[in-house]
């Protein structure tokens, strides 16, 4: 709805936007969760998205003794992003739960929070698989530039985020709402230039299982890549492949056949400092400037000249 979109565009905290390109079933298959351990209605409430914001429903893994064997096992079900505590009041008619209030939880202070310490004590830990997440880099004059952050390994299909969940029940209808908050931590040095927080990323299935069963977040580092993306991702209603597309590639494609092609060919397709398009800068400082400026002189009326797209 429009109110949700407005809240989404106003958010500047981490981590408030993700992408999940896989279906619920594909995520479960990758995590090794069989269909007999699915809960909820994944086929009707959970679908792939390039622009996931709080309030949307995604695939989530959690541990439980629900199975016939009685042993602790990993289950999967759709949950809404943005924690709604189990004790929350029922929204007034025509209104909705505020999913933007608690979509993140600082991992360093969980034990000090009445809400999150309760969930820890109850063992309500979960894992949220995502294809990547978005972050906005603060620039001059209060402007922000969006970046898409994703696994560095070509074989890494998902980032696995540590999270906590709760269950809210409507006493009048019996409806149950499962929701979660993604844990955050100080950023690893490789992306500290981008933001002062990042999701708590678990090291593969073993790391995710350790979090679910033992509550261990682990100390391992999950290597990441990133690139600038279109500002359209700021609109939560925009859900297209363009959301995750490298904005530098998009500009070069737009001006294909221009003098930029000759310029790129002359140096082997490399950008500033020999970094090729699609590669992440080790310092994370590759960012777009305005790719077009008007040419001076008589030809400027009908022609435009490209200037460097790299800092």
Image (cartoon, grey):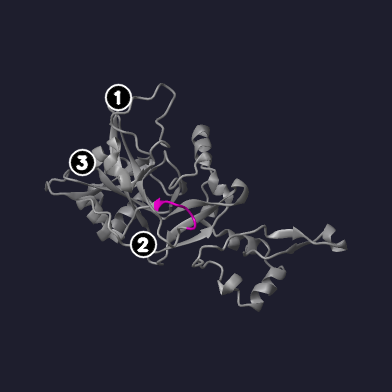
Q: Is residue 263 above or below residue 137?
A: below
Q: Residue furthest left?
A: 69
How far apart are the alpha carbons under marks 2 and 3? 27 Å
Mark 3 surroundings within 10 Å by alpha-carbon count, few (fewer than 14), some (14 through 19), many (20 or more): few
Residue located beneath label 3 in the image: 121
Q: Which numbered mark, 1 or 3, is in the foreground of this view?
A: 3
x%, y% of residue 97? 39, 30
Is residue 138 magenta-colored? no
Q: Earlier in the sequence, mark 2 or mark 3?
A: 3
x%, y% of residue 283? 50, 65
Read off the magenta span: 193-198
Residue located beneath label 1 in the image: 173
> Residue at the location (51% across, 68% down)?
279
Secondary structure character of the magenta stretch overall: loop
Q: Which numbered mark, 1 or 2, is in the foreground of this view?
A: 2
How far apart are the alpha carbons under marks 1 and 3? 28 Å
């Amino acid at each position: 709805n429009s109110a949700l979109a407005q809240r989404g565009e106003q958010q500047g905290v981490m981590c408030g936007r993700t992408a999940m390109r896989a279906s619920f079933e594909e995520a479960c298959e990758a995590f090794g969760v069989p269909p007999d351990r699915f809960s909820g209605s994944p086929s009707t409430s959970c679908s792939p998205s390039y622009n996931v914001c709080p309030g949307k429903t995604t695939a989530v893994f959690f541990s439980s003794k629900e199975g016939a064997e009685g042993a602790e096992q990993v289950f999967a079900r759709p949950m809404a992003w943005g924690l709604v505590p189990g004790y929350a009041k029922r929204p007034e008619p025509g209104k909705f739960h505020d999913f933007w209030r608690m979509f993140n939880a600082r991992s360093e202070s969980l034990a000090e929070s009445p809400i999150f310490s309760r969930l820890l004590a109850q063992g309500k830990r979960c894992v949220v698989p995502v294809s990547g997440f978005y972050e906005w880099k603060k620039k001059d004059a209060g402007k922000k530039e969006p970046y898409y952050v994703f696994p560095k390994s070509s074989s890494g299909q998902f980032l696995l985020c540590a999270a906590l969940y709760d269950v809210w029940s409507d006493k009048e209808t019996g409806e149950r709402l499962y929701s979660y908050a993604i844990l955050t931590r100080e950023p690893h040095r490789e992306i500290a230039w981008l933001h002062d927080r990042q999701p708590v990323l678990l090291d593969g299935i073993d790391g995710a299982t350790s979090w679910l069963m033992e509550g261990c977040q682990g100390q391992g580092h999950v290597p990441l890549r990133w690139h600038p993306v279109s500002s359209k991702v700021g609109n939560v209603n925009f859900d297209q492949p363009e959301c995750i597309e490298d904005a530098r590639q998009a500009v070069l494609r737009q001006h294909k056949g221009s003098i930029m092609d000759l310029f790129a060919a002359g140096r082997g397709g490399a950008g500033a400092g020999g970094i090729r398009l699609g590669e992440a800068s080790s310092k994370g400082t590759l960012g777009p400037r305005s790719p077009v400026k008007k040419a001076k002189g008589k030809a400027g009326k009908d022609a435009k000249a490209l200037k460097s797209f790299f800092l």
